[in-house]
Image (spheres, rainbow, N blue to C red):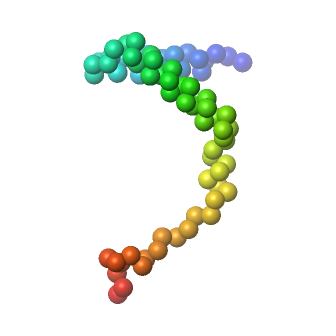
């Protein structure tokens, strides 16, 4: 197994940090925000490891046309 994904991840993170710094954020604040978001992602993953499965299990209902501005034509 190669570590190519790690190199791509690092590059993407560097680009993300650079983009935020260019628009005025402090580098330390960007790092802190990234760590906070990673923490939130970990919590969400612990609660629901595969949220994509949830969507396919739900029944998608058709929208109602009984709202006041609906065309009764």
Question: In the rendered image of this protein, does residue 29 appear above or below residue 64?
Answer: above
Q: Would you identify the image quadrant in which residue 38 lies?
A: top right
Q: How many marks?
A: 0
Foreground residue, 24 or 32?
32
Q: Position of residue 8 (x, y in %)?
A: 53, 20
State the residue at coordinates (72%, 18%).
1
State the residue at coordinates (64%, 35%).
45
Question: In the rendered image of this protein, does residue 1 appear above or below residue 46?
Answer: above
State the residue at coordinates (55%, 15%).
7
Q: Would you identify the image quadrant in which residue 3 lies?
A: top right
Residue sitting at the far top: 28
Left or right relative to 1: residue 73: left
Foreground residue, 13 or 29?
29
Is residue 43 among what the camera can see?
yes
State the residue at coordinates (33%, 14%).
26
Is residue 15 among what the camera can see?
no
Residue sitting at the far bottom: 73
Q: Position of residue 66 (x, y in %)?
A: 42, 79
* Quadrant including the C terminus: bottom left
Foreground residue, 1 or 19?
19
Q: Position of residue 46 (x, y in %)?
A: 67, 34
């Amino acid at each position: 197994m190669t570590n190519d994904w790690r190199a791509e991840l690092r590059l993407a993170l560097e680009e993300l940090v650079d983009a935020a710094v260019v628009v005025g954020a402090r580098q330390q604040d960007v790092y802190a925000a990234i760590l906070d978001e990673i923490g939130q992602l970990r919590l969400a993953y612990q609660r629901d490891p595969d949220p994509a499965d949830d969507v396919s299990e739900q029944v998608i209902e058709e929208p109602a046309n009984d709202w006041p501005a609906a065309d009764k034509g």
